[in-house]
Structure formats: C-alpha cells, structure tokens
Image (cartoon, rainbow, N blue to C red):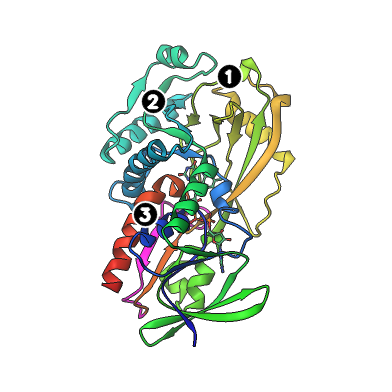
Amino acid sequence: MLAELDVAIIGAGVIGLAIANEIAQQEREVFVFEKNRTFGLETSSRNSEIIHAGIYYPEDSLKAKFCVEGKELLYELCDKHGIGYKRLGKVIVAINENEVAQLDNTYEQGRENGVDDLLLLSQAEIKKLEPNIEGKVGLFSPSTGVLDSYSLLRFLHGQARERGARFVFNTEVIGIEKTGTKYKVQIRDREGISTFISKVVVNVAGLSADKVAQFAGLDILKAGYKLHYCKGEYFSLGSRNRVFVSRPIYPVPGKAGLGIHVTPGLDGRIRLGPDARYVDSMDYRVDEAQKEVFYDAVKGFLPTVEFEDLEPEFAGIRPKLQAPGETFLDFVIAHEEKAGFPGLINLIGMESPGLTASPAIARHVRKLVDEILN
Ligand SMILES: Cc1cc2nc3c(=O)[nH]c(=O)nc-3n(C[C@H](O)[C@H](O)[C@H](O)COP(=O)(O)OP(=O)(O)OC[C@H]3O[C@@H](n4cnc5c(N)ncnc54)[C@H](O)[C@@H]3O)c2cc1C
C-alpha cells in the first residue's frame, strides 16, 4: 500500500520551512520533499538578508500585505528564539531632482501600505546619520532590519521537525497526478522512483515552481505562471573606514529590483548588490566584468568608495513572473480549486520580499490547508 500523507510540501526553502512549521503544529502528517541534500540551499541563502519594511509594493498587493505582517512576526520570532538580527533601519537616497520626485512617491506608497514610521531627511540629516553618504533627500525607514537568514532557516527546520514534520532530502518530485480527491506525488531519490499519496500538495519549489505546477496538469502559460530568471549579483567591500555605513543604504528603486544597495552584514562586512539581469540558465557565478556597473551605481551616493575595494561575492536568482520590461506582478498563492485541482496550493513568483513575508505567508497557507482538510 502507498504511504498516505495529509500534506506534501515541495521545497525546503524559507517559505516551505515556515509552512511546514506552521502546519505541523496541528498534528497533521506533513512531509517536505527537497531535491538538495539539505534545506535552504537555493534562493533562501542567496539574498540580501534584509527584513523589509513593506514600502515599495502597491497597496492591497500580497507583497505589501505579507511583508508588513511578516516583518512584525519575524521580529517577534527572532526575539523569542534568539535568531540573529539587527533593526538598523535603512536610508533610501535621491541624488538628483528626478529621484527626489520618485522618492516622494515611495514615501507615499509606504504610508499607504501601513508603514507609518517613515521620515524624510534633508541633506544635512542624511550626513548626520551617515557621514559617508551623499544625497539631496533621504527616506529613513526605522523598521528595516538585517537578518541572520541561516539561523532563521535552522530554527524553522528544527522546530518543524520537533512538531513532527518529516523532511526527505535528496528527493526530487518528478510528477503529480490527481487521483480522485487526492494526489499521487512521484519522487526520485537514490533508490529510484516511488510514490506517495497526499490529500494536499503545497508547491513552494522556488525557481522550479512553474514546472512543478505543470506536473499536476496546469496550463502554466494560460495561468500566467511561467517564471523568468532574474539574476542578482553581489560584490563585497574591504572593511575600510572610507566606505563605512551603519545601516543599509538604497538608491531609489529600479524596474526589476530595488537597485544596487550597500548593506552592512551582521558580521560587519559591507556588501553591494544585487543588480538585476534576466538570464536563461541557473548559473550562480559572479561576472567580474560587472564590477564597473556596481562601482558606477554606488559612487553617486557613496563617493568614498574606490574601484579596487570591490570583490565578487555571490549571486542569487529571482523567480520572476514578470518578463523583461513588464511592470509589477504580485506573488501567486493559489488554491487551484477553480482550475480543477482542489487540494493543490501553488506559490509562484516568490521573489523579494519572500524572506520577510515568510511567517505571514505560512499562516495564510495554513488557513488554506485547514479549509481543505477540515
Ligand atoms: C538576489 C536576491 C535578493 C533578495 N533579497 C531579499 C531580501 O533582502 N529580503 C527579502 O525579504 N527577500 C529577499 N529575496 C527574496 C527571498 O530570498 C525569496 O523570496 C525566498 O528565499 C524564497 O523562498 P522559497 O522557499 O520560496 O524558495 P527557495 O529558497 O528557492 O526554495 C525552493 C526549494 O524548492 C526545492 N525544489 C525545487 N524543485 C523541486 C522539486 N521538483 N522537488 C523537490 N524540491 C524542489 C529547491 O531545491 C529549493 O530548495 C531576495 C531574492 C534574491 C534572488
């Protein structure tokens, strides 16, 4: 007889772990299938580790809602369980008149999203906070923080296990088939191919979430689920006094990302990035030729930086729903009942602020699972 589960979660990134941890509280039979040897080896460990305030996204979007809620839940979780973070705040700087107008819009957007602690800064106020930073006008977000993301991942995995969730690593989901009111989940591990039966399937497979949705038989083009890869590279700076900043410093946001920012890590190391370039393949190497682009991007607001300070560090890849040139698209978090797949929950396009939003997304998905199973 085939093993039967209540919930099969596909993917052990931060969102999959948060969902497993949330659902496992309810004494359900929860399995997490992960193709890598352990949790969090993809986008969840290749990002800026910023706890975002929720400023940028259109009001009423899931990104705004779950970011603002997730931020508070994450700070609580960190305090309660000793997960490393620093609530440093951040400054967004406008360096010319065009950017000043854009920054005003960002300020308004943030307030509409419920981020009510934002402060506009004059040139002198920027200097007082950050002596090495130049800007005409600044926007200070006190509730932004920097997180030790590995310690969050480790905590979520540990607590989910204690609560009874089972993690199956080195195991790739290769097929999903609807059978009556349940799903056959086909997996491949070192021993070969085998099958589980599950009442609910949660697809939180990050960069492969569109392909996993397709396994189940969804028409991903029609549903608008096709993902585009958008690479973000990072360079680190030598810890020299002339580039010292005490909190994340951002430019006004770009089209595909938030703009190359300067972030002091919890270890004191200063990092530049990420940029945003659409790519066809998953190649995490940092292209040294981009050094000039990074230098030019930050020189305007961090004039003390020297070209030779920059060293290639690492890269991440955003699972984007929007194709190059397209405007904002929201997270997809969908129970696919109307598409003919009751019990299948897809999470697609889980780019930034997915790390910040993860605890709020997990609560939302738990409610969807409760509706299905109760
Ligand atoms: C450059 C960059 C910077 C970012 N900065 C921030 C930030 O500062 N703040 C913030 O809040 N967010 C940030 N993000 C976003 C954040 O990192 C993501 O939203 C989050 O990590 C997504 O988590 P996830 O669990 O959905 O995906 P992932 O971490 O990608 O996990 C998905 C998992 O699914 C597994 N998987 C895939 N297919 C299968 C299969 N068939 N079978 C089994 N397992 C499978 C993968 O191996 C992977 O482990 C950033 C992202 C990028 C790329």
Determine which quarter of the picture holds residue 266. top right
Residue type, numbered disc 1: Phe
* Residue 320 x/y as whole percent: 50, 56
The C terminus, quarter of image: bottom left
Instruction: Look at 35% across and 65% down and name the residue there.
Output: 27
Instruction: Look at 39% across and 55% down and name the residue there.
Output: 330
* Residue 122 x/y as whole percent: 38, 16
Please tell me which of labels 2 and 1 falls first in the chain. 2
Using the image, tell me which numbered label, if any, was put on residue 244: 1
Q: Residues within 10 Å of mark 3 (few under 14, many from 20)?
A: many
Relative side of 167 to 314, left or right: left
Q: Does dot 3 land on a helix, a strand or a loop?
A: helix
Magenta segment boundaries in residue numbering: 322-340
Whether residues under marks 1 and 3 lie with C-beta atoms below 8 angstroms apart, the answer is no
* Residue 306 x/y as whole percent: 68, 21
Label 1 – label 3 distance at C-alpha: 35 Å
- For this rendering, which residue is in front, 69 or 8? 8
Q: Is mark 1 within 8 Å of ligand 1?
A: no
Report if residue 191 is visible in the image.
Answer: yes
Relative side of 318 to 348, left or right: right
Residue type, numbered disc 3: Ile
Q: Is mark 2 within 8 Å of ligand 1?
A: no
Label 2 – label 1 distance at C-alpha: 18 Å
Relative side of 193 to 311, left or right: left
Q: Does dot 2 land on a helix, a strand or a loop?
A: strand
**Residue carrying label 3:** 361
- For this rendering, which residue is in front, 374 or 275? 374
Instruction: Look at 62% across and 61% down and name the residue there.
Output: 36
**Residue carrying label 2:** 140
